Amino acid sequence: MRKLLIPIAVVSIALLGWWLWPRDGTGAAIEFTTQPVERGEIVRIVSSVGSVRALNTVEVGSQLSGQVIELLADFNTPVEAGDLLARLDPQTFERRVQEAEANLAVARANVSIQAAGIEKARANLANARAEFERQQALVERGSVSASALDNAEAAFLSAQADLSIAEAQHQNALATVQQREASLEAARIDLDRTAIRAPIDGVVIDRAVDIGQTVAASLQAPILFSIAQDLGEIQIEASVDEADIGSVRGGAAAEFTVDAFPGETFQAEVGQVRLAPNEEQNVVTYTVVINADNPDRKLLPGMTASIDIVTGRREDALRASNAAVRFRPPEDLMPESANETGGGPGGGARGNPGEAMNRMLVEVGVDEATREVVAEELREGFRGMVGLFQSGADRETIRERVTAMTREVLVRNLTAEQVEQIEEIQRQRDATRAGTVYTVNPDDSLTAHPVRLGISDDRFTEIVIGDLEPGMELVTRIRRTEPDA
């Protein structure tokens, strides 16, 4: 008898549950799935990939053509600025130095010759002047003819010209010496360039030359070595889609992983958002430079990094599940309040502006008396702008005037730090979007709650403005169960 009572009891309980289960007008049972509103952290991220690079990589080339006769650096060789990396055959350049030295010696000897020529011209000039003066005296006494004086004068003028020529030739010889000195210096520079040296401190990460190889430098210097500056710091050039680039800012925190160290996360920071777009197959991306420390030199150039850039963080946010934010009931269960408040996909409301301002004042620690003063001055300011509202001015002009008036009131009554905090809160709230979430009433009907939504992560969305409180159950799904025939 007891064995028979057990299945009867089970069937009775099932029938009672079926009778009490909520149903719609068709007799189908309605099952609500809900998740609670709660407080917690929300972290919004933008994901990307990029290659690990040295902070600064220098390609070392050769300005000369020649054969490599010596290599003093190889892959992974640590070097300091000025260290010898390789040497080209210097014989040709040594001969050019010797030739330039000989040309300089000839030029300097020519200077000495021209200096002697000046002295000779000066002596001839002195003799010609003396002869001219004697002829002048003799002509005055009538001892010689006038033609003799003319000859002496011509000789004197010719000697002056010879001295000018000698001095000019001496200047030319001096200029030639400077030219030969410059040629010698250029030859020595070329000779010095046969020694390929490291321009920076770092590590050789690539060697593109071997002993005996001929280097041909023509229009472009051939690359012999690549040197990565101190690998204690690295950077990653990540490609971020144009849809996400608007939320990425310099200084934002980031973290990344590499396949070489599974399970290990490296911390980083956004160093630069480059303005130049990269377009490929109609897809536009922007390069974001991520900087990170690499004290153990574990990260190597060329590694592929999977990056998460933190574009928003809320520590103690009121949050709802993404499923609840996306949920929209079927038409036959849509509450009337949803139509009144715009509870569709684009619904929601910002709330009373005065209440929103008061909440912000409370949030930054403004006392009640100051809040009342701010509220009164804001009301007075709006009353003074009634004419602007009635004039039919465009929305942008009205917004700018209201913003300026509000800031004047805040600056007049609050500290600079409080004003900055309120402006930051306002910027965050301006970035919100409208939404509607739903709760279940005791009679199994739904109530729509218009809200303003903030940042989202892969599980939760921030509730910035709304009448929700922690613990409230939000509908994420409705399932209809047809009764058994």
Image (spheres, rainbow, N blue to C red):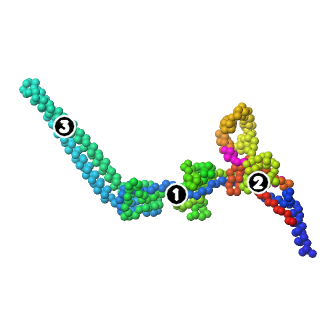
Of labels 3 and 1, earlier in sequence is: 1
Instruction: Say if 191 sits above or below 362 in the image.
Output: below
Read off the magenta span: 427-441
Residue 377 visible: no
Pointer 2 local density, CA inside 10 Å: few below 14, some 14–19, many at least 20? many
Using residue 251 as the reference point, say whether residue 356 is left or right of it.
right
Mark drawn on residue 53:
1
Q: Secondary structure at mark 1?
A: strand
Q: Secondary structure at mark 2?
A: loop
Pointer 3 local density, CA inside 10 Å: few below 14, some 14–19, many at least 20? some
**In the image, farthest residue toward the left:** 143
The residue carrying mark 2 is 328
Instruction: Say if 303 sits above or below 424 in the image.
Output: below
The residue carrying mark 3 is 162
Q: How far apart, in angstroms, are the residues tagged by discs 2 and 3? A: 110 Å
Pointer 1 local density, CA inside 10 Å: few below 14, some 14–19, many at least 20? many
Q: How far apart, in angstroms, are the residues tagged by discs 1 and 2? A: 47 Å
Q: Amino acid at mark 3?
A: Asp
